[in-house]
Image (cartoon, helix red, strand yellow):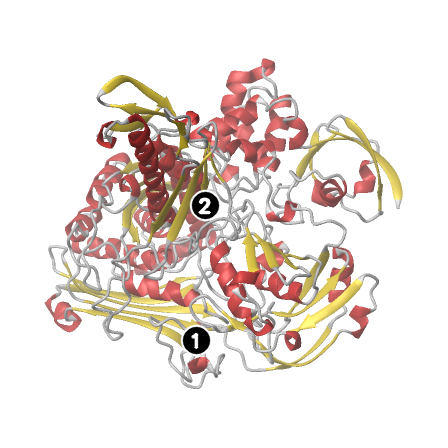
Amino acid sequence: MENYRNIGKPEVRIDGREKVSGAAIYTADLDFGPNLLHAHVVGSTEASAEIVSIDFEEALKVDGVLHVFTARDFPNYQFGLYMKDRYIFAQDKVRFHGEQVAAVVARCPKAAKKAAELVKVTYKKLPQVLDQMEALKEDAVLIHPDLENYEHVPWFFPKAKTNIAHWRKVRKGNTEQGFAQADFILEDSYHVPRYAHCAIEPHCAIGKFDLSGRLTVWATSQSPHTQRHIFAEALAPLGITHHDVRVIAPHVGGGFGGKAGVTMEILAAALATKCKGDPVKVQWSREQDFYNTYQRLGVVTNLKIGVKNNGKITALHHRINWDAGAYVEYGANVVNAVGLSAIGPYNIDNVSIDSVCIYTNLPPGGAYRGFGYSEFLFGLESHITRIAKHLGIDEVEMRKINGIKEGDTTAYSARMNPSGLHEAIEKVANEIEWGKKETSKDPNKVIGKGFSLFWKAPAMPPNASSSAFIKFNEDASLNILVSGMDIGQGYLTVMAQIAGEILGIPTHKIRTENPDTDRNPYEWQTVASHITWSCGNAVKKAAIDAREQIFDLVERTHHLHRETLYLEDEKVKCTQSASFELPLSDFVINGIQVEDGTFKGGPIIGRGVFMPEFSSTNADPETSQGGHPNVHYTVGAGAITLEIDKETGKMRILKVVEAVDVGKALNPSLVEGQLTGGLMQGLATVMFEDMRYDANGRLLNPNFTDYKLPTAKDIPDEVIPIIIEVPQPDGPFGARGVGEHTMLPAAPMVANAVEDALGVRIREMPITAEKIALAYKAKMEQSSKDG
Amino acid sequence: MKKITYVINGEARHLHVEPNDVLLDVLRDKLGLKSPKCGCDRGDCGACAVLLDGKSVRSCLILAIECDGMAIETVEGIGQDGLSALQEKFIALNSFQCGFCAPGVTISATELLRNNPRPTLDDVKEALSGNLCRCTGYTPIIEAVLQAGNEGGEHGKL
């Protein structure tokens, strides 16, 4: 066991004091002076329609209104992260209810809002398709007739003249033979609706195109550098290049995937170019945040698993139909990621997976914590429990029999990384007292237990990279310059712990700040739970680079062999000379003076870069065999003890346990924060939340009154987070990602506990009290009829 | 425009407001107090909570003009002479993640502890039930309030 000073310690967040004192500045808190302009966006009132005309004469008459902009000002400016299928303003037609068709720019927000209500848009309704299964039909209306002309990454396979934007196919072994060998086959479908991220901070972006032609955007962001890149690409027709664009990201009030890529931020960037000299603010309302950013994609799956009587899985077929919405520039990669991994954390020889990205006339689907894994795990882990029950095998035992181990092959035949999956299963089963039946004191209530495994890999391009600079100050305090975002997970603190560990500096003497793309080195995006791993590696390399410069200098000036030098307690020390102690603050800026009175050295600045050079998406599109698309998987297990009122279906979580293999918990307090918080977000999707649309594709509950988030009164009676540490060989100090994974087991473990308690199987999320009560009532009525 | 006066965090400040100006906007845009946040603009999330004559209110639901002559306390005021025992406890337990809900939670919890220095778990849950947090699952926030109550009690600086 390494004797670490900073790593592995439950240190307090370096941004804790700032956030608790009210000092922390978020995007909407920034002041821009009296020239600030406010944009109010006019959203479509149709899900699918031709825009016949936009009349804004009345809007321009409102006092304080300066401009109204529409697609005519940005003709065919297409953009997107993985596929360019999106426009700054809807062009000739709208594809979802709420899509931006115009923006009013005014001196004050009240005038902008009032004028936006006076913009008259005339629509001619077009056929609409709100359901992905309908959109798959041959005669379905084409939402993007020009699909084949869209630019996209090489690992997407759109089908021209259909609504299929991408189809990820995986074929391994021989499923026909696998199913023929099975003693039992279970086939069924599962349904998961859309969900909203609900970061408490709504999206906000301010663009300023100054008189010199410089475009600066301040944004609530998970992706400053990627946003800069997309702004430069989208606004290229105006002659704007990367050199002209700067993105500044202050503290961000929660992301969960919703502030990754580019959604509404494009409006601030684009509108600013038309209001040269004055900053333009676009502040999304809570309602707009719900329907015009990204939503979690909806899913209808068909799952078929064959097993031997001993519980060994012989074959799996998983067909996953995604309701990806009107634009899939980000969402299609959710589909891709799940296609590669919808085998789950199991070792199965015969696999076929079809993950199909389908356009619908609903709001764009995109990244959401878990990146599609929650959605397919709901069906998969429900299925495992049902099969085990049918075979008369304990379901935890069945998971152990099939659970993936290091060196086993994934569905695309790469080797599984070191993993503590089986340790997690054991620990969770022990903690939840698996197998011990519990009864409620209340005769109207029953208690059930549910179990689930999970896994997830970062979904990212094979060349997604991180970089870091580290600079010393006179007092041997450090500034770390990186471009990841602290969206709450504690990234800034962990980067400080990594650098502090290498350089012998206490974490509290290190500042890591939110980025400015002009000042901070490149980072792809803060998504995919890859930032601790990827940027952590870059910071570690930068710290080692700084350390080597220090050793060079001390070797040169003090004539000590560098192999004998080490850093501790902000000093350079020597293994061969106990009396030698050189405080870093003596020289890290001003250098070391030698006998002749001159100085050697100078400011110490470290540099580090990390790119996963082993990753590749080159694979056969018909089978996905051949590449190495995923860098590693993080695995774990969860279990729940649920008390249910038989009459009302009301649930109470008596205990919930979750174990996750983080490789190395660089800060156990922050890892536990991810476990506790992620679990709650996962449980909320099962037990509380539900997006409802009317027949015209209008979201009926875009607010926190009707889209119910859990409150402090809704928390489980007991939450037990368990940290497993099987090191990731290429992770900083052995760490791998954990941010998204913690919500993954929630839905299936609740479904499994409901069945354990009441004998009813619910295959459609959410699992509300109402749904449970009705299912149980139907079951009792059926059994009395039969009986 | 009407001229009104607030006692904000102990200081009397005079300002002009329109009859339809909302307290949250006036605090943020006219008085430069940025700790109250706008999360929903309809009283659901609690991020805009402030203490109005000692009682927590949602400043997005109150007209600025209604508060003429009243005392308003925000998180900037609670910590102006050094952070409170509750705030220190929030820091020590890593209670918050993104921190956007922190000001509103701090207002609700401060009000609770001033009125009920040794709250029970149910008291804390009840007091915080109007503040939405998406990051933490509430547990580390509740724990900090309970610990601040038990350790600070009547003598703590809240």
Relative placement, left or right, of A131 versus A341 is right
- Residue A376 in picture, x, y percent from top left: 33, 60
* Chain ID at mark 1: A
Which quadrant is home to the C terminus of chain A?
bottom left
- Name above or below for residue B153 compared with residue A151: above
- Examine the rendering and report whether any part of residue A157 can be seen: yes
Q: The residue tagged with tag 1: helix, strand or loop?
A: loop
Q: Distance from label 2 to label 1 (Cα)?
A: 49 Å
Classify 10 Å Cα crowding around label 1: few (below 14), some (14-19), many (20 and above). Answer: some
The answer to whether mark 2 and mark 1 are in CB contact below 8 A is: no
Relative placement, left or right, of A30 versus A501 is right
- Residue A42 in picture, x, y percent from top left: 67, 67
* Chain ID at mark 2: A
Q: Amino acid at mark 2?
A: Lys
- Report the residue that reaches farthest toward the right: B2
- Residue A588 in picture, x, y percent from top left: 42, 31
Q: Amino acid at mark 1?
A: Glu
Q: Which residue is mark 2?
A: A650
- Name above or below for residue B2 compared with residue B56: below
Q: Quadrant of residue B62?
A: top right
Q: Which residue is mark 1?
A: A151
Q: Earlier in the sequence, mark 2 or mark 1?
A: 1
- Examine the rendering and report whether any part of residue A260 can be seen: no
* Towards the viewer: A441 or A731: A731
